[in-house]
Image (cartoon, rainbow, N blue to C red):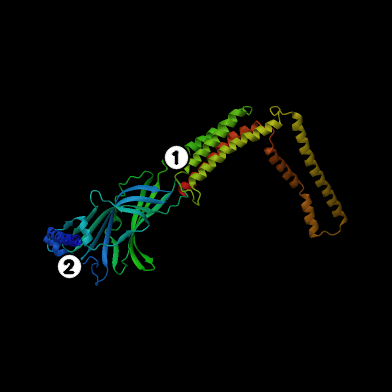
């Protein structure tokens, strides 16, 4: 029983000792603060905003972009390190003097600060090496300068239709979380010059073409809140993609044309070139999509070009298949007999002669009918005019025979000759249309 009382007494004494140490520590902390700061903090309520009963408090903001670390097309976001500076006037912090007071960043917990947050931020953190990267500065008229260094990952909606010749416009939006426009007003301290650092910024794949600021309001169910928006336009550098994707794909297309100069009897050589170029082009197409979203609903410019190159390479392989098939069905195609040409010509002349005979017969019948009839009607004139133009069907038939004759392959070895001219010409024409469209439209 005596031991239980001793334990209770020891616990009570320990509690009293801890309480006395906390009081002495608080008093010591108050003694460390200079008299000017003690007078400012005395009676200050950090839970009430400045001008609580006299209208909204104006908060000016400015940014310094230290770096833009990554711009991800897969996640459609960018990661940037920024210096955010906020200025406002708090009449409760006025003091006598002509110099500003630079305080330790940890004293910011004793003051009222705006509840600013970054819209569309996925992940953000405040740098704390070696201490929290905060700056608090108070001026004699009560103006407060509050600066922090943060790294944030912000969502950016991208249109990759013209990738890699695209331009992306991203934003950095700042809003007040709890104070509406009746409590707080945001403004840029220097207009478009409020954001600095982009002119000297070096990015891996992009160039900053333009940037500007704007002031707006965010409307939610709970009210209207102040919002500042910083817009910046990024243009992608295409040189990397030209060397990495476009030039290799063009060389593969040109390599597939080498088979046109190889003899059709060299089956292994031509098949090897065709299959190798097709497989290499497939690998190149797969590699070009590794850094892009997998579930995008739009066709990119690089996909169009790779598809064109793949079509030409596959077409070169099909060209040899057609030429080889025709050569197998015409084993003596190198020396086509004259009898075959004469037979084709006689068949064509026979068809034309039959058409001519039918036309002359119809003309004779029309002449007999016109002599017997005493009166001519308008329909009779139209009928004679219709049959009198019999030369027109003959000319049409001749034209059709000429067209069909162009597609008729007399010698399969001429297919390669046609391909040597048609494939490069069509590829050049398509390239002209492709680059003009995606670069200027």
User: Whole-Å distance between the Cαs marked 2 and 1?
Assistant: 67 Å
User: Which of the two labelled residues, at mark 2 and mark 1, occupies the earlier sequence position?
Assistant: 2
Question: Residue 213 in the image: x percent, y percent?
Answer: 33, 57
| Relative side of 191 to 437, left or right | left
Using the rendered view, name the quadrant where residue 56 is placed.
Answer: bottom left
Asked which quadrant contains residue 397, the reply is top right
Picture quadrant of residue 39: bottom left
Where does label 2 land, which residue?
43
Residue at left 82%, top 49%? 362
385 left or right, relative to 214: right
Q: Quadrant of the N terminus?
A: bottom left
Residue 308: x percent and y percent? 54, 42
Which percent across, then down, holds residue 57?
26, 66
Q: Nearer the viewer, residue 359 or 403?
A: 403
Which residue is more in the foreground, 290 or 413?
290
Above or below, comparing residue 192 to residue 182 in the picture? above
Helix, strand or loop under label 2: loop
Task: Give the residue at x 29% y 68%.
Answer: 183
Number of the label disc, if any, that sits on residue 242: 1
Query: In the image, residue 170 lies at what x, y percent?
Result: 38, 53
Q: Write the residue at 34% across / 66% down.
A: 225
């Amino acid at each position: 029983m005596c031991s239980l009382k001793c334990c209770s007494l020891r616990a009570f004494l320990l509690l009293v000792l801890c309480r006395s140490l906390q009081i002495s520590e608080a008093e010591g902390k108050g003694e460390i603060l200079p008299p000017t700061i003690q007078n400012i903090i005395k009676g200050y309520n950090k839970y009430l905003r400045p001008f609580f009963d006299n209208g909204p408090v104006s908060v000016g903001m400015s940014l310094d972009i230290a770096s833009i670390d990554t711009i991800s097309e897969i996640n459609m976001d960018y990661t940037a390190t920024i210096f955010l500076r906020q200025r406002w006037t708090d009449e409760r912090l006025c003091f006598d003097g002509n110099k500003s007071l630079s305080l330790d960043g940890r004293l910011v917990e004793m003051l009222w600060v705006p509840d600013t947050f970054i819209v569309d931020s996925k992940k953000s953190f405040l740098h704390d090496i070696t201490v929290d990267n905060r700056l608090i500065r108070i001026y004699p008229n009560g103006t407060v300068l509050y600066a922090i260094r943060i790294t944030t990952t912000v969502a950016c909606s991208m249109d990759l239709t013209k990738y890699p010749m695209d331009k992306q416009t991203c934003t950095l939006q700042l809003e007040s979380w709890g104070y509406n426009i009746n409590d707080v007003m945001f403004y840029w301290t220097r207009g478009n010059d409020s954001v600095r650092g982009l002119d000297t910024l070096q990015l891996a794949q992009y160039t900053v073409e333009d940037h500007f600021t704007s002031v707006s309001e965010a409307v939610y169910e709970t009210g209207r809140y102040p919002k500042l928006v910083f817009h910046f336009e990024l243009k992608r550098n295409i040189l990397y993609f030209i060397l990495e994707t476009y030039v290799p794909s063009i060389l593969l297309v040109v390599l597939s044309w080498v088979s046109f100069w190889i003899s059709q009897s060299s089956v292994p050589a031509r098949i090897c070139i065709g299959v190798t170029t097709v497989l290499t082009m497939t690998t190149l197409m797969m590699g070009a999509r590794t850094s892009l979203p997998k579930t995008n609903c739009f066709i990119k410019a690089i996909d169009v070009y790779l598809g064109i190159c793949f079509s030409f390479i596959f077409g070169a392989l099909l060209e040899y298949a057609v030429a080889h098939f025709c050569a197998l069905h015409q084993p003596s195609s190198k020396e086509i007999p004259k009898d075959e040409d004469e037979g084709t010509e006689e068949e064509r002349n026979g068809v034309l002669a039959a058409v001519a005979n039918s036309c002359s017969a119809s003309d004779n019948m029309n002449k007999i009918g016109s002599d017997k009839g005493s009166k001519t009607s308008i329909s009779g004139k139209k009928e004679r005019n219709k049959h009198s133009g019999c030369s027109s069907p003959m000319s049409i038939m001749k034209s059709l025979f000429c067209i069909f004759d162009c597609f008729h392959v007399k010698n399969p070895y001429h297919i390669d000759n046609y391909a040597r001219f048609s494939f490069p010409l069509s590829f050049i024409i398509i390239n002209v249309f492709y680059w003009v469209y995606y670069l200027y439209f």
